Structures are given as C-alpha cells and as structure tokens.
Amino acid sequence: MRTVRIVRIVRIVRIVRRIALAGLLALALRGAAQAAEFIRGDANGDGRVTLSDVAHIADQLLPGALPAACASAADGDDDGAVGVGDAIAVMLWCFNHGPPPPQPFPDPGSDPSPDLLACEPFTAPGRDPDPAYGVSWTHPAAVQRGQPAVELFVRARTAAAIEGFSIAYLVEDASLEVASVDLEGTIVPPSPAARPGTWSFFQWDLAPTLIPEVRLLVAGVVFVTESPLERMAFAATEGPLDGEPLLRVVANVRPEAPAGPEPWKVLWPAPESFPGANEYAVGGKARVAGVVDDLGIVIVDPGEFLRADSNQDERVDVSDPIAIFAYLFLGGPEPDCLSACDMNDDSRVDISDGVFGLNYLFLGGPSIPEPTSCGLDPTLDGLLCPRSRCRGP
Ligand SMILES: [Ca+2]
Ligand SMILES: [Ca+2]
Ligand SMILES: [Ca+2]
Ligand SMILES: [Ca+2]
C-alpha cells in the first residue's frame, strides 16, 4: 500500500516536473522570439539602414499604426522606446551628420542592453532595382566655365506615392563645386516646416571619398508637413515617368573645369554600397531606383567676343539688330555667340537689344558696353559664346 503511494507521488512529481519543464521551455522560446537578432536602425528589416527605415519608423508614430515587427530595430538611439528621436537619429546617420547606431550594427545581433521592446523574426524584402522608379536631372545644356550658382534639379520618377527619397552621387570635384542642396523650386510644399534648417527630415552632405578628385553628394528627404506625425505622401507620377523636381543643387563651375564641345560628366550615380543610394520609400519599404541618370553638361570657355556683332561678320551695323530680330521673331537659328547679341549687357538677349543697337546706330543712343574690340565679358553671366570670330574663323 505504502509502495503504491510512493509510486503515485513519484509519478505526480514527474508529471508536475514535466509540466513545469514544458512551461519553462515555452517561456524560453518566447524569450528567444523577443530576442531575435536585428540590426539597429534597420526598422524595415531589409538588411541596410537607409532613409526608408526613417519612413518606416515615422509610420510607427502615426495614430493607429500597427506595432513594428521589430521595435528593437526601430529604437535607433537605444533608449528603450520608439519615438521621433529614433527617426531623426537614423536620418542623421544616413546623411553623414550623426554617429552610427548603437550595437548591434552594422551586423545583426542581439540587444546588448535588453529592454522591454520586442523583436519578432521577420523576413527581409529584396532590394532589386525597380525600373518603375528613376532618378534624373533637369540641367542646363551648357554652362560657362567659372559661372557661379548653376541650378541643377534632381527629378524623381515614381510609379507610386512615395514617402521619402534619397540620392547618392559622385561629384567630379575638379569641375563642380557644390554650394548647397535645398528644396527651392521643387514640388515639396513651401510650408515653414518644409524649409531646410527647420525641417528635421531633410538632410544633405558632401563627403570625401578615397579618390581625392571625387566627392560623394548624399541628400534625402522624408516628406513631412507641420509635424513628423503628419507625413505627406508624394503624389504618384504616371505614364512615361518624366518625374518631378524634388531637390535643387546649386553649384559653381570651377574656373579650371575642362571646356567642351562634348558634355563633361560632373555627377554620376554612386554604387549601391554607399549610404543614401538612390532609393524611394514606399510604405516604409525601400524601392531602389532602376533607372539612374548621370549628369553631363557642356562647359563652355567664356572666350573673347565683340559685343553687338550678332551675326559674326566683325562689324557692327544694321545687319546685327536685324539678326537679333530674326532670331527672336522669325525662328532664325540660335546665334553662335549670345554674349555678342546682348548689346545692352543686361545678361539677357531680348527685343531691347535690337532696339538698343538701332538707337546706338541711328539715334545717337548710349554706346555699346565693353568689349567693343575682341575681349572678355567684364561681367560674367549665363550667356554663352561657344563660337566667335574673335577666336578665328
Ligand atoms: Ca532597412
Ligand atoms: Ca529610441
Ligand atoms: Ca555684325
Ligand atoms: Ca540684353
């Protein structure tokens, strides 16, 4: 009888132990799930920390948003909570203005300072270049060597509403001096929050590379309106994907830049390994631009010219204002030397130049500004003179 009781007790103890072990095992498994390996800052789990992660973190901040699969990864500053500060910290790192995210980074690992944030294992979407997205440039066909403040616009071509956009371009530093990147003249709304300096979600940087003559231009924007919580999705562009201007780059063409006649490449896409590689954020996920144009411009030597000799016959007479009127109003060919056509030297070629010439020739009007013999323009402007009799026939 006693033996039977002992056997029963042993059995009960075994069952209790088994249940306890199963419970411990379940707890352990749940703990393992919470402690899945992650890369800090890689909130969307594609294996890289980019602007799309900033968009993904911002998604989590919207009211009613589903919790992130891996809050630990979204906790970019490792303070144990996910907030606007994480989006800003990750954005700053992407654009070379902040320290790299705390461990684990850049390789996956577990959190060295465990907190209450969870991290379920989740599969990483691919990063294949998508031909539906592209990056191109609106650019002047030609600029004068030494010309200051050339405006270059980055055009974004999209097939869907995007939440953010970043570029990484290599700059031919001997030709082009990048002065600033901003949102002037782009389709981004000019709200106070959208202005550079007050807008935390716009960043750019010009970083050195291993090659001294080449610099890396990175710039990116996550669309926000008044607050990071009210993000604006950029409207979709349909059809041939001509794109919309999204970033303005202001640059100076260096005096030592090699002059044309062929376009000289000054900006070309950085390899995808660079941070900020040409990427669109769509629903917090990265779409890598499948079409990325480089930028070549014809750099024109300012050269010597004779002002008011519009038709390049080495004389200033009535045929010169007539040549300007023919070009402006009769669909005549563009003159070889627009600098010479700018008779009144106001940096434009328009009807007032023809009138100025007639006034000078026949009515004793003001004299023609310099150079009135072959020479350089004393005031550098955007007008070009690729061919002039002053440089030979
Ligand atoms: Ca990522
Ligand atoms: Ca945080
Ligand atoms: Ca002439
Ligand atoms: Ca003029």
Image (cartoon, rainbow, N blue to C red):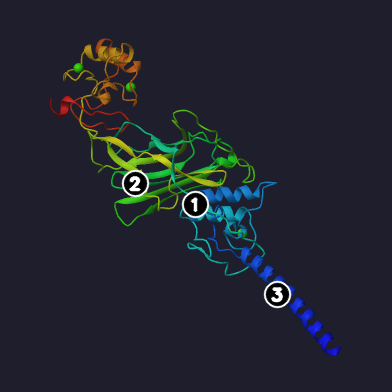
From the viewer's side, name the closer residue of 233 and 71.
71
Pointer 1: what residue?
50
Q: Picture coordinates of residue 251 (x, y %)?
A: 37, 41
Quarter the N terminus occupies:
bottom right
On the image, which quarter does residue 292 sit in? top left
Q: Is mark 3 on a helix, strand or loop?
A: helix
From the viewer's side, name the closer residue of 344 and 35.
35
Q: Residue at x 21, y 18 (%)?
A: 311
In the image: residue 14, left or right of residue 238: right
Q: How far apart are marks 3 and 2 (CA)?
A: 62 Å
Q: Disc 1 beta carbon < 8 A from ligand 1?
A: yes
Q: Disc 2 beta carbon < 8 A from ligand 1?
A: no
Q: Residue at x 18, y 28 (%)?
A: 374
Pointer 3: what residue?
21
Outermost residue on the right side: it is 1
Q: What element carries label 2?
A: strand
Which of pointers 3 and 2 indicates the residue nearer the eye? 3
Q: Picture coordinates of residue 312 (x, y %)?
A: 19, 20
Pointer 2: what residue?
171
Q: In this orientation, does residue 80 appear?
A: yes
Mark 1 surroundings: few (<14), some (14-19) or many (≥20) residues within 10 A: many
| Circle 1: residue type | Thr
The mark that comes first in sequence, 2 or 1, is 1
